[in-house]
Image: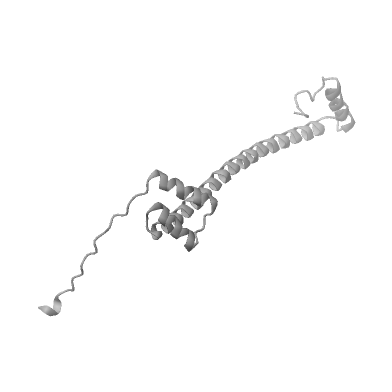
Amino acid sequence: MDQFSYPTFKKKQKTHKKRMNEEQLRLLESNFNFNNKLDPEHKSRLALELGVPPRQVAIWYQNKRARDKIHGLETDHRAMRAQLERVLTDNSRLRDEMERLREELTRARGAAALGSGDEVNMEKDLYASLVRGGGPFDRYDFFG
């Protein structure tokens, strides 16, 4: 039965890493804000100041860069969503305006066709309604 036995591996003891306190985090943040890349000399100096292994400092920097990148992407996404909403609203408003103008054009063409066909009279009526008010074009807001 030895041929079917499996090798046993010894489990590594997990060492719990020590969490950094507020002062350590503040120091890391201020250094990160000054320079978000870490050279080996700077990493060693920070690790000594903080009393943590250099690898922990390097990982903190790496995680912080990733968090900043994600935060930037989220901010960009929110800005683009807001811009999209504005464009969609403007598009809808312009489509409604275009439809309204098409209807007015159709009514104006219909009125001209139903009338005596005299476009000069229609222009006079339009001018009269614009200048002094009154006339068949009062219901239209040409400048609004």
> Among all residues in the image, which is located at the extreme left?
1
Q: Quadrant of the N terminus?
A: bottom left
Q: Is residue 72 above or below residue 126?
A: below
Q: Position of residue 116 (x, y in %)?
A: 86, 30
Q: Exactly how many numbered labels are in the figure?
A: 0
Give the residue drawn at x 65%, y 36%.
93
**Residue in the foreground of this view, choosing between 8 and 45:** 45
Q: Is residue 67 above or below residue 135?
A: below
Image-quadrant location for residue 44: bottom left
Q: Is residue 9 visible?
A: yes
Q: Position of residue 45 (x, y in %)?
A: 45, 57
Give the residue drawn at x 54%, y 44%.
78
Q: Is 89 on the left or on the right of 1, as rendered?
A: right
Q: Is 17 on the left or on the right of 118, as rendered?
A: left
**Residue in the foreground of this view, choosing between 89 and 121:** 89
The chosen color scheme is: one colour
Q: Is residue 118 visible?
A: no
**Residue in the foreground of this view, choosing between 68 and 21:** 21
> Among all residues in the image, which is located at the extreme bottom?
3
Give the residue drawn at x 73%, y 35%.
101
Q: Position of residue 24 (x, y in %)?
A: 41, 48
Q: Position of residue 20 (x, y in %)?
A: 37, 49
**Residue in the foreground of this view, choosing between 34 and 122:** 34
Give the residue drawn at x 53%, y 45%.
75
Q: Is 57 on the left or on the right of 13, as rendered?
A: right
Q: Quadrant of the C terminus?
A: top right
